[in-house]
Image (cartoon, grey):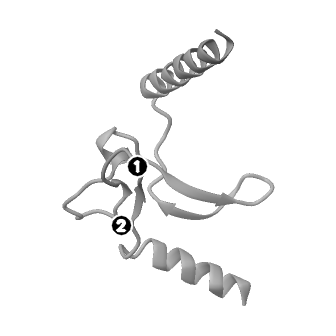
Amino acid sequence: MLNDITQGLIDYATSGKVKAYAKTNLGPRIPLYTGGPGDDQPGLLAKLGIRGGIVITDTDGKPLYTVGDPASTDPVRSLIFWLLLALVAVLLLRGMLA
């Protein structure tokens, strides 16, 4: 029964009927995930060139189920992301300690 519920939720989320937005008090909502391919308004992750999916594995690491198209790691984008994250962390820490 739990597998049927889980499968139903996964099917619903990948059907194109689900959208995710980031909303702050600083402006309008920003689409993060807009339901799948063919949508006329790509999400923020797609605009940044970030692709991904969900991979569910067993304890040995063997994939049991995938949602979307899990992309291989792009070393250049990964380096840029982690450097920007480190820069933000340093600036935040510097601001808190100053």
Residue 89: image quadrant is top right
Quadrant (top left, top right, bottom left, bottom right) of the C terminus: top right
Residue positioned 53% across, 16% down in the render: 87
* Image spot of residue 33 (x, y percent): 39, 58
The image's mark for residue 86 is none
Q: Which of marks 1 and 2 is in front?
A: 1
* Image spot of residue 46 (x, y percent): 33, 47
Q: Pointers 1 and 2 in contact (CB under 8 A)? A: no
Q: In this rendering, is residue 15 above or below 98?
A: below
Residue positioned 51% across, 63% down in the render: 67
User: Residue beneath label 1, please?
Assistant: 25
Residue positioned 41% across, 46% down in the render: 51
Q: In this rendering, is residue 63 above or below 8?
A: above
Q: How many residues crowd mark 1 within 10 Å: few (<14), some (14–19), many (20+)?
A: few
Please name the amino acid that badge 1 sits on.
Asn
Left or right: residue 93 compared with residue 41: right
Q: Which of 53 and 85 is in front in this view?
A: 85
Quadrant (top left, top right, bottom left, bottom right) of the N terminus: bottom right
Please name the amino acid that badge 2 sits on.
Gly
User: Residue beneath label 2, please?
Assistant: 35
Left or right: residue 52 compared with residue 9: left
Q: Which of 47 and 11 is in front in this view?
A: 47
Q: What element carries label 1?
A: loop
Residue at the extreme right of the image, as rendered: 59
Alpha-carbon distance for marks 1 and 2? 24 Å
Q: Which of 73 and 31 is in front in this view?
A: 31
Q: In this rendering, is residue 48 above or below 60?
A: above
Q: How many residues crowd mark 2 within 10 Å: few (<14), some (14–19), many (20+)?
A: some
Residue positioned 56% across, 78% down in the render: 9
* Image spot of residue 4 (x, y percent): 64, 87
Left or right: residue 11 compared with residue 98: left
Sequence-first tag of 1 and 2: 1
